[in-house]
Amino acid sequence: MRATHIRRTAGAVISAVALGTLPSLAVTDATAQTAATARPDAAPAADLRPGTGAARHIALQGAVNVRDLGGYRTEQGRQVRYGQVYRGDSLSELTDSDVSALAALGLRTVVDFRVPLEVEHDGADRLPDGVTLISRSVNDLGLYARTIEAIGSKDPVRQQEMLGDGNAEELMRSIYRSFVTSPGNRSRFAAVLRDIAHRKQSAPLLYHCTSGKDRTGWMSFLLLRAVGVPSGTATRDFLLSNDFRREADRRTREGLRRAGLMDNPDLLVPLQEVREDYLGAALDQMDDDYGGLDGYLREGLGLDTATLAKLRARLLRGGRA
């Protein structure tokens, strides 16, 4: 969704302001480069920003948070393969050149975590020919609809009541806890891990939501931890969304202000950012319900030893299929 849409109608703006669903306003950068063809285990053309470690950012015009999960090291020193799994934000605003860039990555499967209301407002994914799209919407506990109500009211008092005084932060913590407590959410995350473990090794997969930070962030954290990447490294990958989304989210807030929808759009910052506190809410819930990561993967997600071993073999250098 672009700034012109923000001015056109409140609904078009509001449609993107729930769990990881603020709009991916394209940030045009004359120096940005599109991704080159990536063979398995080879780093694609990317924006390797200072301090981002192994995170490979795929520079696109219509999305700001598409990344290759390759390059991270496990606790045993093995490396996650490049060109196998990608994480992203909304793909509905991709340009023709963006679609060509995704085609060059060799994608075969895209998993969309968005709820139907998001797809209705923001549009379906724009994908290269031959890519299979799988919808696995992750329940947002009504956060999307409630945020629509807050912005649509145009009432500063109502918006403060709904999002201020720590309410937005608590909404986000509730969503993260639901990644652990909701059977439906667990089944969708588990399905992606099974897809990756059992797919053909030469068939890259991308999963995304709208901002590519919460549902996608949790999925990425899980995947990295499941193959042995240290918690601190996986957390840093999670927090990188703040860097890649910062300018797009600032433009969103400014657009809401100019459109007269919010006097204080900074009320949305807790919804726009990822925070260790949010991730911690999910991890604490995981400890309470399953005794930690291994219990969550095996009992909560229903992944057996063979699937977890295959996941590591598919994604780690030196692993066997």
Image (spheres, rainbow, N blue to C red):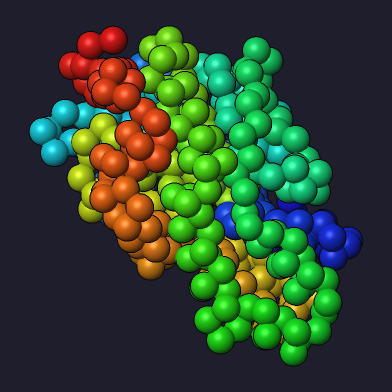
Q: Position of residue 272 (x, y in %)?
A: 56, 64
Q: Residue at x 44, y 50 (%)?
A: 180
Tag count in the figure? 0
**At x 56% / y 68%, what residue is drawn?**
171
- The answer to which of 283 and 57 lies nearer the viewer is 283
Residue pictured at 48% horizontal, 40% vertical: 186
Which residue: 60% across, 44% down? Answer: 138
Report the residue that reaches farthest toward the right.
Answer: 8
* Quarter of the image with the C terminus in it: top left
The answer to whether residue 4 is left or right of residue 84 is right
Side (left or right) of 216 relative to 146: left
36 and 24: which is toward the camera: 24
Residue 132, quarter of picture: top right
Residue 122 visible in the picture: no
| Residue found at the far bottom of this picture | 157
Up/down of 71 relative to 222, above or below: above
Residue 14's place in the image compared with 196, above or below, is below
From the top left corner, tell me how far across and down residue 191 is, in percent: 49, 28
Rendered position, 225 above or below 168: above
